[in-house]
Each structure stands twice: as structure tokens, then as C-alpha cells.
Image (cartoon, coloured by chain):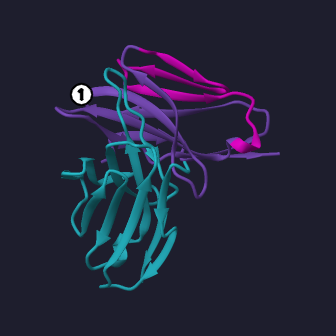
């Protein structure tokens, strides 16, 4: 979905390096999420934010940190990258209407390789 | 152990044929179930969303069914097209105090051949 953009789309880094993945959205949604996808596994939630002042850990937050710079921007950082953080990373947004299941809109993903 | 299991892991079908994908889940408490389509190199896109009270939902040639009693869902693709080649992901929403956390299946990779 072009309304959710991620940069970079591909990144190769070395063990121990700090890197940042960025996500921007023009949908005007308050809620933003970071997931990782590994082959043979479902997407897993790393962090989520319901507004600029709200940051919550997901199921696999160890080794990651996030920053919600604005409603439209949500960045994911790997403080010291390790090879098992090699994965496909997705940002998503949502704006749940009352009484209706929310839909999450995903960005195109960032493919990260840690050597 | 993943609480959302999908089968088969992959399948190949001829263009124009139908196919059915399966999803079994154990998550509780259940809020809703959705099917996403993920094209190669793209993020997942929602196809259908069903609450526990719905047992079928269609989106064009895609029809999803839900049996909340047996905790099973299926996605049926009718008259497949080459553009249907993608991974199809079953996602179950778990009701929590504040929001519906999503549990993702690993996906079924569908390849449609001419």
C-alpha cells in the first residue's frame, strides 16, 4: 500500500552495527506496528504504538527499540545487529472504527541481512 | 507452538481451477479471523474479515468460511488466475483488554500455472 512507506527496502549490515528502519504513513492513522517475518513462521509483533506518547512491547522486542517521532512516523532500531535478526520487517498502521474489526495496512517491507 | 496452523504449506494449481486453503486455530478468546494475501515482495493485504458470528464472507473470487465451534476456517479461490499466485495468510485476532492482538499463520504459498 503506497500510503505506508518503508525505508530502506533492502539493507545489508554487519554484526554489531546499529541500524534504523523507518516507516512513514499518509493514512492519518494513530496506531502503528512493527512486525518481522521469517520463512516458515507467521508475522510476529515487535512493538506497537497507539499514539505519539504510547509505546508498547510486542512478543519479540528484545534487541529492538522504537521511536514514534510523529503521528506519521515510527522507526525501528536494532541497537547491535546480530545474524538471527535477518528477516523481512513490516510496518503497519490501523485506525479502528468503533464496533468493527480493525484492518491493518502494511508497508512493502524491508529485507534485512545481518552478516 | 503456533496457535494458527495453515495447510497445505504450498500448492500448485492450473489456471482456471479452484482450490481451498485450510486454517486451524487454538487462540482464545477469539475475536475475529481474517485472510490476507501477500504478493512476493509486498506487504500483506486484507481479503476478508469474519467475526465469530459470521460463517462465510466473499470478496470477488475469494470465499472464506468460518466454523468457530471447531476453530477452523477455509479460503476458497474460484477460477484461479495467474495473479492469484501469492502467499495467503490466516490471521486470528485475540481479544484483550485494549485491542485485538493478531496471531498470524505461516501462510500457504499458492502458485498458479498457465
Q: Is residue A96 depicted above or below B43 in this figure? A: above
Q: Where is residue A38 in the image (x, y as percent from the top left)?
A: 43, 60
Q: Say if residue A37 shows up in the picture.
A: no
Residue in the image at 53% along x and 20% along y = B57
Q: Say if residue B102 shows up in the picture.
A: yes
Q: Is residue B84 depicted above or below B22 in this figure? A: below
Which quadrant of the figure contains the C terminus of chain A? bottom left
Residue nearer the viewer, B31 or A47: A47
Q: Report which quarter residue A66 is drawn in.
A: bottom left
Q: Is residue A92 left or right of residue B85?
A: left
Circle 1 Cα neighbour tier, 10 Å, few/some/many (<14 / 14–19 / ≥20): few
Q: Is residue A114 depicted above or below A73 in this figure? A: below
Q: Mark 1 points at which residue?
A: B29
Q: Is residue B18 magenta?
A: no
Residue in the image at 36% along x and 23% along y = A100
According to the rendering, which colour does chain B have?
purple
According to the rendering, which colour does chain A have?
cyan
Q: From which residue to which does the magenta span run?
A: B54-83
Residue in the image at 37% along x and 21% along y = B70
Residue nearer the viewer, B69 or A6: A6
Residue nearer the viewer, B45 or B31: B45
Q: Report which quarter residue B15 is drawn in.
A: top right
Q: Is residue B96 left or right of residue B6?
A: left
Q: Is residue B97 depicted above or below B43 in this figure? A: above
Q: Is residue B73 magenta?
A: yes
Q: Position of residue A52 (x, y in %)?
A: 24, 51
Residue in the image at 20% along x and 53% along y = A55
Q: Where is residue B59 in the image (x, y as percent from the top left)?
A: 60, 25
Q: Is residue A83 left or right of residue A105?
A: left
Q: Circle 1 sits in a helix, a strand or a loop, which is it?
A: loop
Amino acid at each position: 500500500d503506497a500510503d505506508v512507506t518503508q525505508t530502506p527496502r533492502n539493507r545489508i549490515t554487519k554484526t554489531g552495527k546499529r541500524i534504523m528502519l523507518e516507516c512513514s504513513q499518509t493514512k492519518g492513522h494513530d496506531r502503528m506496528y512493527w512486525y518481522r517475518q521469517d520463512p516458515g513462521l507467521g508475522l510476529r509483533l515487535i512493538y506497537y504504538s497507539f499514539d505519539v506518547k504510547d509505546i508498547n512491547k510486542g512478543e519479540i522486542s528484545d534487541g529492538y527499540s522504537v521511536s514514534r517521532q510523529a503521528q506519521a512516523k515510527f522507526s525501528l532500531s536494532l541497537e547491535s545487529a546480530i545474524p538471527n535478526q535477518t528477516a523481512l520487517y513490516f510496518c503497519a498502521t490501523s485506525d479502528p472504527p468503533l464496533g468493527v474489526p480493525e484492518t491493518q495496512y502494511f508497508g512493502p517491507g524491508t529485507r534485512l541481512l545481518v552478516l | 507452538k503456533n496457535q494458527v496452523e495453515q495447510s497445505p504449506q504450498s500448492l500448485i494449481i492450473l489456471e482456471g481451477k479452484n482450490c481451498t486453503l485450510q486454517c486451524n486455530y487454538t487462540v482464545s478468546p477469539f475475536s475475529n479471523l481474517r485472510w490476507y494475501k501477500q504478493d512476493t515482495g509486498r506487504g500483506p493485504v486484507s481479503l476478508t474479515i469474519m467475526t465469530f458470528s459470521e460463517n462465510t464472507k466473499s470478496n470477488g473470487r475469494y470465499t472464506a468460511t468460518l466454523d468457530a465451534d471447531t476453530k477452523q476456517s477455509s479460503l476458497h479461490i474460484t477460477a484461479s488466475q495467474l495473479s492469484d499466485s501469492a502467499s495467503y495468510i490466516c490471521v486470528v485476532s485475540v481479544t484483550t483488554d485494549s485491542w485485538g492482538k493478531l496471531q498470524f499463520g505461516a501462510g500457504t504459498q499458492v502458485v498458479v500455472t498457465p
